[in-house]
Image (cartoon, rainbow, N blue to C red):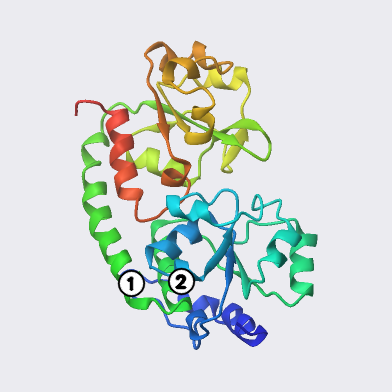
Amino acid sequence: MSADHNRLSRRDAGRFLLAAGAAAAVPARSLAAGPGNRVVCVSKQINEFVFDIGAQSHLVARDLTSIFPPQIRKLPSVGYHRALSAEGIISMRPSVLLTDGNVGPEPVLAQVRSVGIPVETMEPGKTPEEAQALMLRLGAYFGREAAAKAVVARWRAEMKPALAAMAPYANRPKPRVLMIHFGQIVNNYLGVTRGSTADQIITWAGGVNALDQMGGMSRLTPEIIARSAPDIIIATDVGFDRYGSPAKFRELPGVALTPAAKSLRIHRIDETEIMYFGPRTPAALRKIAGWLHPGR
């Protein structure tokens, strides 16, 4: 892919926003126009979407957090998305480094650009509508427009009844939910705060975030965990698996003092199901609602 194409993509980025129910605009040229294109993608959301539309043959490497679908793990990793390795990226001889903007460090990106590898950024989908627009943009980018439209149509068809099924919980007591995520780069447990994708899904499911902070992630202490008094704890896979079971997870400092621990309402969920919107969001929503409102 040429540098001219990279500039064109950035200039035309605004054309790919999705209006309600409308198809995304198609860029003048697509990555698929060149059969030799090699993509290093360092966004777990984008990587999953690339597989969804059947464009994975372009991928030659991933970041450490891109683990779904399982077959992507066969690709070499170029490091954590905010601690990338320039040597690792350059050694893959990519045509482009594809990101969602949440990448670094900047000197690595500068080094990648300095050897002629363009860095293409596609904004992440922070709402279902934005995520669907991203899917359609990727379809245009990879020459897989029909596949992307089919995925989005199926996603919308599943999302509408999933949201409708949440209506009965609107006027019921809302259990307090603490979402715990293990941050691999900081080697510590983090709380998923308000304003995040996970927080929105919990709200739809008829729960309320046990943390009052805004901003996406917040470092947890035993005191914060105990004080948040969650009725339910949902832990993402890496952190949960360090303990191995709900009973053992109570050993995480602060957890044993919570109502969730006393009733053993501690659940495991894959990070990729809840940290960003995608075609699996309807199923994740129904799963979480079942945990929050068992037997209803």
Question: What's the amino acid at mark 2?
Answer: Leu
Residue 39, located in which quarter of the rendered image?
bottom right
| Image vertical order of residue 199 relative to residue 106, above or below | above
- Is residue 44 toward the left or the right of residue 173 in the image? right
Question: What's the amino acid at mark 1?
Answer: Ala
Instruction: Please give the residue where the numbered disc 1 appears in the rendered image.
Output: 147
Q: Are marks 1 and 2 in contact (CB under 8 Å)?
A: no
Q: In which quarter of the image is the C terminus?
A: top left
Q: Position of residue 288 (x, y in %)?
A: 33, 35
Residue in the image at 50% along x and 45% along y = 196
Q: Along the line of sight, which residue is nearer the eye, 49 or 163?
A: 49
Q: Where is residue 157 in the image (x, y as percent from the top left)?
A: 23, 59
Q: Along the line of sight, which residue is nearer the eye, 103 or 68?
A: 68
Residue in the image at 70% along x and 55% along y = 84
| Image vertical order of residue 150 relative to residue 6, above or below | above
- Is residue 257 toward the left or the right of residue 136 in the image? right
Disc number for residue 138: 2
Residue in the image at 77% along x and 75% along y = 115
Q: Where is residue 291 in the image (x, y as percent from the top left)?
A: 31, 29
Q: Position of residue 69 (x, y in %)?
A: 42, 52
Residue in the image at 46% along x and 71% along y = 138
Residue 233, located in which quarter of the rendered image?
top left
Q: In which quarter of the image is the N terminus?
A: bottom right
Q: Can residue 135 be seen in this view?
A: yes
> What is the spatial separation of the Cα atoms under label 1 and label 2, in whole angstroms?
10 Å
* Secondary structure type for disc 2: helix
